[in-house]
Structures are given as structure tokens and as C-alpha cells.
Amino acid sequence: MRVNGVAHPPVGDSRRLLSDHLRHDLGLTGTHVGCEHGVCGCCTVLFDGAPVRSCLMLAVQAEGHEVTTIEGLAAPGEPLHPVQQAFHECHGLQCGFCTPGFVMSVVGLLREHPNPTPEQVNEGISGNLCRCTGYASIRRAVLRAAELSQK
Amino acid sequence: MTTRWFGAPVQRVEDDRLLRGRGQFTDDIDEGALESFIVRSPFAHARIKSIDVTAAQSVPGVVALYLAADLPFGSTDLPILIPHPNLTHGRTQRCLASDVVRYVGEAVAFVVADNRYIAEDAADLVEVEYEPLPVVITPEAAAAAEHLVHDDVPGNVAAEMLQERGNVQEALARSSHRKRLRLRFERGAASPMEARAVWARWSEAEHRLTVYDSTQSPTSIRGGLAVLFGLPESDVDVIAPDVGGGFGPKIMLFYPDELLVPFAAMRLGRPVKWTEDRQEHFTAVNQERGQVHEVEVGFDGEGRVLALNDDFVHDAGAYTPYGIILPIITAAQVPGPYSVPNYRVRFRDMYTNATPTSPYRGAGRPHACFVMERTLDAIAAELGLDRVEVRRRNLIAADQFPYEVGVAWQDGNRVVYDSGNYPALVDRAVEMLGPRPAGDHIGMGLSPYVEGTGVGPYEGAHVQVLVSGKVVAATGIPSQGQAHATVWAQIVADALGVDVADVEVTSGDTRKFQWGVGTFASRGAVMAGNAMAVAAGMVAEKAKHIAADLLEANPADLELAGGRVRVKGSPERGVPLAAVAVHANPMRYAFGGGTEAATQFTPRPRPGPPLAVGEQPGLEATGYYSTTGSTWAAGCHAAYVRVDPKTFRLEILKYVVVHDCGRLINPLVVQGQIEGGVAQGIGGAFYERLAYDADGQLRNASFMEFLMPYATEIPAIEIDHIETPSPLNPLGIKGAGEAGVIPVGAVIASAVEEALGVPINEMPLSPLKLYELVTTRS
């Protein structure tokens, strides 16, 4: 599989979850695991460009596919991706644990709806749980991200 | 002191690493660590007949398997964090149970393996033979005491406490109106997005134990580990790295894993880690909120409360590691912002066969608020008065501060409100709420509240100006998302006259700061914030004294601004702070940073050695802030809701918050705290419920069935602030961490009661519960 544009050798252990493979085999610990049953969305990554729960996939299922994690959005030292920048500007995170999952979901959302309505924003982030922010600042961040993405 | 940064909406300095996926949460740390899994009791109450680990130990890749008998501390009862004379029958669990288990999730065995998958495989093969015992699961059942949770605790009563202000019996007798209510609050769960995790390494060469722990109190964990493992504290480092939310239950001394992981790391000579999964988090981590109140209130024809008698039971769970803080807080906070001239409160802390309880955001207060607000609504209904007017008639007036409530506070002192303006909060909330929306099945709820914040005993801070002119600061208490590194940088930057971006704050790392208590009870900003101000103020004074020698000026004539120490009124006469830092360390080999600038200044000669007796090198200081009283924040929430009469879905049409936490350090951060708190309150009021069955099984231990709100359930919230500074601390601040959550249940209950016309006497609600209430009525 290719992760953030880099090819990796096949996964040895057939029962390894994609989330565990990313975190513990490839050291991409920005993908977080909050529930391991596909509800919280912390482990969201892009799978061939679309948001998926990496805790609900086996790593072997990703062979031959392109995976993008939070680390793949902006290289170290480079400016933040517009979605990341918008979360910063709008105070869209507190503890930061759910944040990578939200950011990846929003990247997917804005690909589908570059100018989302408030309803589309709510719908687009309604697969991710956040326990700190109460979502208000995240909704603001999504709209701001749409603005930044078009600059 | 200038106040350039204090009060400004400074954007968070923590964000960059977290947004790039380069934060460091405990489970992110690897370093070849062995992984582990805890075997837990599937029974709520059972005697352990035997444990057979033969099959588990034979699984390839299993490195160690520990039972209670394998632990040197295996027969030690874990500590009671906060003992109290009224806690006559305190009981705590042992690290691993070997005799009786008293809740589902109690730890029984610990498996260490090459990786987590193998550890879980082996855990499945640990054969524990249990003899089930009768289960006590509700506080009512505990009070009935048909069965005992602990054989040696009569009546299941861990503690009983009675307090009285005035004479309630006499005041009730002369009240023209009296009313009785029975109010019930069920258990809830904090559910931070990161479950708990511990990583530990023992270095034989350095004789040093290093523990990463997703805790809210690394300093306490360090002290406890040092005692238990017979090490000097200086040989133990405990670091709370990025912590993915806390909300209370991440502070314990100890969860079993906090001993098992360091123990295994020392025994095996390899790093060991343990990461909790979501399912075990539901029963292994402390919960809160279960209480049943029997209230009698006496009042006059104008709706003024004359006497309040509250007799309640608190669901302690199976053990009392946290003492009786929760019912003490509830007892203290029932009167809230209201004048209750005669108040009698008795509580009994009851053992049940469920997970132990300890503070969860709000900590005894949401239930207290619910009790008082339900009582006031009952008074309004009885007299046919407007609910808001009844509240106004009972509020403590703005000129009555300091106000003594007449009961004990959690710190052992009396409850004294330091400052506030409660009528102004209600007025502003009513104004913001505006006219009632058109439509049917709409209800309004409004609830003012108070919150004791900033409880002592103390916190400390270390502040140092480096020779580069940059500033580093550290405190003992960790952050779980409260933007400590930002707000404390604001305080330090003001005191030292530097840019906030030049201040780097570390919190929750005992290598950087060893002393302190923890992040809980809305105390971080008050306690550590003021400690930062004390330490930074000491550094500023030291800088002035050193610069006075360089500038041939009087220290009193100097000020710190723009990264320099300069003469007031003659800003061109000054010296860079970086150069002062160089001169603060009288040495021969100065290098880097402000050294070149420092050579431009020659201190005026003074007698004696370069470092006089009592002086310390370096432009740094350690300062502490301690307090005798809590700061009392307050606020008022109000809402319009609509309940669908067929589906009983809750629609929050408008939700407003007026908040007073004294002076705001950073309005963005406070707004985030409130918005998050309200969302948690809404979850706890209508969606989240811990569904224990009669056997003590938690039937909904997953996010599929424990319904934490998504964005689709949480409305926009309108927030305004008033600021009545606290007279108790130099910065005038009060805590803000729990304010969002406290009155939400009371507001929703009041609004739903009006919308549906059925009495609401319990929390949480749900569509099913409302359906039952409505159909029972008709």
C-alpha cells in the first residue's frame, strides 16, 4: 500500500487492523484510536481519497490502495493545510485527540461540497465525536476551511 | 504590570503539533515496549474460587502473567485519597482482586506479551472460577440493605453527614406553604475521547523509573509510586504528555494499571505499556452522578424559600477511593445562588456493586443544581407564579458578598462566596433569550448556578529567562486541552514584558516541575495561573535589580517592556532582557544569546563575592500560590426547547449562557470551555445513560449504545460574560472548567416540563422516558 505517497511492503500479520498498522508499524501516530468499533471517527483516514474508519479495516485490505493520514496533509515545516489552518484560527480543537479524524473527514467533505451549507457541515462531521468543543468551533472551522481552500 | 496579553483572544500555541498529527499521547510512545491486557471481572459481585493461568502462560509471546499473589503490594489496600472523619467505613480495592470482586470491570490478572494481540489471546485463556454473590445495584437497594456490598459495612453506609444552618424544623413548621419532592439523578460517564494509558521504563543504569500516564495529576502519581516501590521521589519521573480529555476521572491514586505497568517494567527490565480499550473504559474508569434526594421545602406566599430539608443518598459504587468529596460538594451547592435561611442537609454515601465514583465535570454540582431548581419550579407551580420571578425573589443580592452559606466545603473550610452579581446574570440571560418562539410543545427553562472553583491547597511554577531572551515556564499540573501553554504564556509575557510567542510553557512533567496537586475542580487557571504570576513577578524583580546595576539606576525606576528592562519615562535607556539573563549568571564562559549585548554593560562595582550570600544565579524563580478560600464563579443558562409530541425528540431552539468567572485571561479559551461543557450537559440530560441491569451488568458499554451527542444534537450556543473579579487572588480570576455543564439538566428539565406538562423529577431524560411519563399521565 502507499501511505502519504510512500510505498510500504506488504503487511505480515493478516489480522492487524489498518489503524494499528499505521500507528505501530509505520509510526504514523497521528491517526488515533478512540473506540475501535467505528463510532467515534478518531481513526478516520482517506482511503483512495475518501474518508474511512481505519479501525474497521484490516491492514491487508489496504494492499494496492492509497492511504492518506493526517501526517500527509502538510509536510513538517510546510504551512498547514487549509483545513488544519482553519481549525487553528477557529479554536476548533482542545485536547486534540479527535482532531486528526475531524480534519480528515472535513477534507473529504470539502472535496464533495466545496461550499457546504450549514446542514451539509453538520452532516459532514456527524460521524465524528468530540468531547471537548461542543462542535460550535468545529462548525466555524469547516466554513472557514471552505473559504481558505478557495483562496 | 501591563495587561497587553491578559484578556486578549490569543490563538493557541498548542495547535500546530496536534493539527499535524505530531502530538504525543501516551499510546503514541513505543520504544519497543511490551504490551499488556488486564483480565477483569465479568461479575458485579462474586467470590473468586480459583484462577488457572496454565493455558494463558503457554501462549507463545506471553512474557509475564501476574496475579495478586505475585505483587509485593498485592495485599495492600489502595489509598483513600481524601480521608474524612465522617467516612467511618471507607473501603478501597486492591490492585488485583484475589478474594471477592465487587463490580464488573474490577481487575483480576495482568498479562504482558510481545504485543497486544497476543496479550488479549492469552487473557481469554485465563480461567477464573467465580461464585456469584447477591448484587446491590441502585442507591435505593443499597439503602434497603437486603444484601451487603462489604460484609463488614453495616447497611452499606460508607459515610453519613448532617449539617444545618438555622432551624429547619422550626422554620418548616411556621411556613405557610410546604412541598415534598423526590428527585433522582442517574450515573453518567465522562468518556474522554482518549481512554486511559500508561507507559513505563525502568533504567537500571540510571536507577530511574520513567512513567508516561494519561493522568490529571502526575505529581501525586509520582509521590505514590515512590512510596510503593521504595524509591526516592527524585528517582521517579511521571509525565502526563498530551492527554486526550480528562473531565475528572483521569485523576486517581491509583488505577491498577498505574501500578502494574511500572511494576512489570521494573521486574522485566523492558518498557511496558498498557492502553485501555473503549469497552473496558466504560466499567474500569470511575463514574459519577447517581443520587436520590428527598426534599422538603417551606416557603411563603410570595415564593420565598424559608426552609429547605434535603436528605439524599449518594451512589459511591463498590469502593470509596476518593473519600466523600462528591456528596460534600452536592450538600454545599444545593442552595446555589439563593438565600436559604434555614438549610438542613443529610447524606449517606452508599456502597453498590458498580464502578466506583469520583468527580466528573460538575462533580456533585449538576445534581445539586437540579434539586434546587426543581424545587423552585415546584414552588412557582404551587403558587401560580412566574418561574423566573420566583428565582429573582430568592437570589442573593449583589451587596451581600462575601456570603456565608453555612455549610462545609470540600477543602474543609466553610462555603463563603467571594463575589458575584447573580441578579445581573439572570437579567442578562432573560434579555438574551428573547421572546418565546411560535409553535406548540415549546418550553422555557432558566437556571442560575454557582460553582466553587480554584480550590487549594496550592500550585507552583518555575519561570526562567534564557540567555536568548526566550522564556521557559513550567508547572506541575497537566493539560487535557485547556490551553494551559497559551494562557500561562499570556500571564508570564505580561509580567516580563515579552511577546507571548517567546514564552514556552511545560505542564504536567515532574522533570520540569516536581510539586503541585492536579488539574481538577476548575482550579488550573486560578491556582497555577496565579503561581505563574508570582514566579514571573519574582523574575521581573530580579531583572530590575540586575539591570539597575547595569544602568546605574534605581530598581524602582525600571520597567520591563518590549523584551528589555528600561527606565520609566526614558525608554531609550535600557538593556535587553537577554543581556540581563547573561549577567544573572556571573561566569567566565558566557556564550550565545544576549552575551554580545551583555558586554556593552558593565555592572557598577559592589563589594563582596560575585554571588552574594542568599543570591542565586540565573534569571529564574520558583513561586507558589496558595489560598484559604475557593473562588465562586457563577452564571445563568436559559433555553427554549421543543419536544415532538409523537417521537419525543428534543429540539433545542435557543440556548444562552451568561457567565461570570471574574477576569477572563483568554476569551477564546473560556468560550471553548463553556461550549464544550454545555454539550456534555446536553448529552447527560437527554442522550447518555449508563444502563445497568439488576445483575450489575452495564448493558450499553459502547459508543453504539451510550449515545454521546454528535454535532447534529448540539445547537449553537450564545454566550455573554459579566466580570466580577475575585478579591481572593491578585489576578481576580475564577475557574471556568465546569460552568458549562452544571445547570444544563435543570434547564432541560424545566423546559421539557413546560413543553409536555408532565412533572420531571429525574435525570437523564430520553424519548422513551418522556413517552412513558406522558402515557402514564394519560
Image (cartoon, coloured by chain):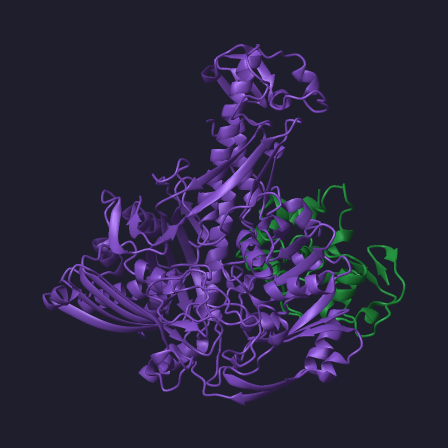
Give the residue drawn at x 52%, y 79%. Answer: B698
In the visual, does B62 lie left or right of B585? Answer: right
Q: Nearer the viewer, residue B187 or B212?
A: B212
Image colour assigned to chain B? purple
Residue B92 seen in this snapshot: yes
Q: Nearer the viewer, residue B277 or B142?
A: B142
In this rendering, position of residue B425 left or right of residue B188: left
Observer able to see residue B765? no
- Please name the residue shown 51% across and 19% down the image: B545
The image quarter containing residue B724 is top left
Q: Quadrant of residue B293?
A: bottom left
**Residue at horizontal 64 percent and vertical 22 percent from the top:** B582
Residue B94, relative to residue B26: is it above or below?
below
Q: Nearer the viewer, residue B769 or B133?
A: B133
Residue B337 position within the rendered picture, expressed as x and y whole percent measured from the top left:
29, 53
Identify by letter the chain in green. A
Q: Is residue B769 left or right of residue B111?
A: left
Q: Position of residue B434 (x, y in %)?
A: 35, 53
Question: Toward which corner of the image does residue A79 lie, by quadrant?
Answer: top right
Which quadrant of the figure contains the C terminus of chain B?
bottom left
Question: Residue B192, relative to residue B179: is it above or below?
Answer: above
Residue at the far bottom in the pictured view: B131
- Residue B612 appears at what percent x and percent y? 54, 21
Seen in the picture, residue B664 relative to A30 is either above or below; the reply is: above
Q: Give coordinates of residue B396: x percent, y percent.
A: 24, 50
Q: Is residue B114 above or below residue B597?
A: below
